[in-house]
Image (cartoon, coloured by chain):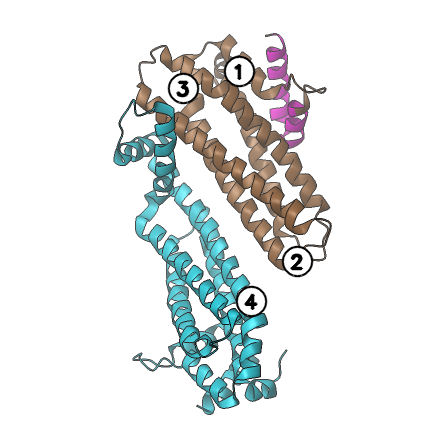
């Protein structure tokens, strides 16, 4: 099956756009944090960090509310390749990854708005920030890997195309926001032209659901 | 730069040079950990870390014994000893990861996964740690398990380096100043001698050899001047 056919057969695989963009955003924030010095304002860092984290938190919330229930539901319908125990292990791993990241996000915000506040950062605070950003990047890398290797393939195998598109809609469209396309817009800023073209096609499909 | 005369007047100022050497070594070690994430040689990191661990343990033991123990009434001295314990613990944790080998990156998750499973299943299923680890290893694949371990190692190396830097900063601000104020030059010389010369080693100058490998010619000259007075 060609990649093009596969894309149409398993739209859930297109979650890679979100994962790629999250990795890129994390890498950019780490680069900015590595270059921070006591003479620098934290404004640029805070903007980039908040930009990344807003999407990350939305993504993790939607995973908890939509992806994991879909996985449970799908597998309760007797997937031949996995027993319930293994499913529970995968879900537990995903939950651990989410909780680890949420805790780290709180730690960074505590430094940004607690230790630093309105004053200029000192070397020690900057180093702690850099350490926490690296820890967050690592935690995200591990978590996305778990999604890519364990969860998405199961969903791709078990859900039909319409259900996959419906799930993707929950991950890419924020129905609770005034601007429901803000995730798609954020993705466009982090993807290359080829991926952006595929994303536009995907968006038109999920809007039809 | 601090001039030679200052070091000769206050031998404890040698500490700034020792810290400088440690910082150079630690940054290099951390970079080796970072390189290992991208497929670099883990052995290079391991060797550099093991040398650091040996040096820092000797250094902290010597400081505890000859520098801070005599400062009986000093709260800063007690804090310094506590920070040494934290560094020893950090070094031991890193050694644990290295002993655990390339599967450590997964093993560290297994306990958390087990706990989440308990909450999830209400003991409906009974899985051993080994079963969970084996399943995850198969599901994720050896190569990615190795990558997770390397990433974890890098994070730990950076955290340990920062712990060390913070400690040096505290020590220089709160302890070294007290030593300068409260100890005679002879007492300071005695501390410096123990810091530089390991009398229980077959090669008592192994610390000086290492310092010479990390420091520039001016700094080496200061150390040589001090050594000539032992």
Q: Using the image, determine if residue A115 lies above or below residue A63.
A: below
Residues packed near mark 2 inside 10 Å, few (<14), some (14 to 19) or many (20 plus): few
Find the magenta span and give its range.
A183-208
- Which residue is label 1 attached to? A167
Q: Which one is closest to the eye, mark 1 or mark 4?
A: 4
Image x and y of residue B80, in percent? 49, 68
Residues packed near mark 1 inside 10 Å, few (<14), some (14 to 19) or many (20 plus): many
Residue A122's disc number? 2
- Which residue is label 4 attached to? B170
Task: Give the CA separation, mark 1 to mark 4.
Answer: 52 Å
Residue B188 shows in the view: yes
Q: Which of marks 2 and 3 is nearer the N terminus?
A: 2
> In which quadrant is the N terminus of chain B drawn?
bottom right
Q: Callout 2: residue from which chain?
A: A
Q: Which of marks 2 and 1 is nearer the N terminus?
A: 2
Q: Is there CB contact under 8 Å for labels 2 and 3?
A: no
- Tell me what residue is drawn at x 33 percent, y 11 percent: A78
Magenta part mainly helix, strand or loop?
A: helix
Task: Give the CA separation, mark 4 to mark 3.
Answer: 52 Å
Q: Earlier in the sequence, mark 3 or mark 1?
A: 3
- Tell me what residue is drawn at x 42 percent, y 50 percent: B153
Residues packed near mark 4 inside 10 Å, few (<14), some (14 to 19) or many (20 plus): some
Q: Which one is closest to the eye, mark 4 or mark 3?
A: 4
- Which residue is label 3 attached to? A154
Task: Give the CA separation, mark 3 to mark 1.
Answer: 13 Å
Q: Callout 4: residue from which chain?
A: B
- Rendered shade, chain B: cyan
Residues packed near mark 3 inside 10 Å, few (<14), some (14 to 19) or many (20 plus): some
């Amino acid at each position: 099956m060609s990649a093009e056919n596969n894309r149409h057969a398993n739209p859930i695989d297109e979650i890679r756009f979100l994962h790629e963009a999250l990795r890129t955003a994390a890498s950019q924030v780490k680069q900015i944090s590595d270059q921070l010095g006591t003479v620098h304002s934290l404004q640029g860092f805070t903007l980039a960090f908040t930009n990344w984290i807003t999407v990350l938190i939305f993504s993790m919330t939607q995973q908890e509310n939509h992806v994991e229930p879909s996985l449970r539901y799908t597998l309760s319908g007797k997937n031949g390749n996995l027993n319930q125990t293994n499913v529970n292990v995968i879900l537990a791993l995903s939950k651990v990854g989410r909780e680890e990241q949420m805790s780290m996000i709180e730690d960074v915000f505590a430094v940004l708005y607690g230790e630093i506040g309105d004053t200029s950062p000192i070397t020690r605070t900057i180093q702690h920030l850099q350490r926490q950003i690296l820890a967050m990047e690592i935690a995200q890398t591990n978590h996305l890997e778990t999604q890519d290797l364990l969860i998405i393939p199961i969903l791709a195998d078990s859900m039909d195309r319409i259900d996959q598109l419906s799930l993707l809609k929950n991950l890419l469209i924020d129905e609770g926001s005034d601007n429901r396309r803000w995730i798609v817009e954020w993705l466009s800023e982090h993807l290359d032209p080829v991926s952006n073209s595929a994303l536009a096609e995907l968006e038109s499909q999920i809007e039809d659901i | 730069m601090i001039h030679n005369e200052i070091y000769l007047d206050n031998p404890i100022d040698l500490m700034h040079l020792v810290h400088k050497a440690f910082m150079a070594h630690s940054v290099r070690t951390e970079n080796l950990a970072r390189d290992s994430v991208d497929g670099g040689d883990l052995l290079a990191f391991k060797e550099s870390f093991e040398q650091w661990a040996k040096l820092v343990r000797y250094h902290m033991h010597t400081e505890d014994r000859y520098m801070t123990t005599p400062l009986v009434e000093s709260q800063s001295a007690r804090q310094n000893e506590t920070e040494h314990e934290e560094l020893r613990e950090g070094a031991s944790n890193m050694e644990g990861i290295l002993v655990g080998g390339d599967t450590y990156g997964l093993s560290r998750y297994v306990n958390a996964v087990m706990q989440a499973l308990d909450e999830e299943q209400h003991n409906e299923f009974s899985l051993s740690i080994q079963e969970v680890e084996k399943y995850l290893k198969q599901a994720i694949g050896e190569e990615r398990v190795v990558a997770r371990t390397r990433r974890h190692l890098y994070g730990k190396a950076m955290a340990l380096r920062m712990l060390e830097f913070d400690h040096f900063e505290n020590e220089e601000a709160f302890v070294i100043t007290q030593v300068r104020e409260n100890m005679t030059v002879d007492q300071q010389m005695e501390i410096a001698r123990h810091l530089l010369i390991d009398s229980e080693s077959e090669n008592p100058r192994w610390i000086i050899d290492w310092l010479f490998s990390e420091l520039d010619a001016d700094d080496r000259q200061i150390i040589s001047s001090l050594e000539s007075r032992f």
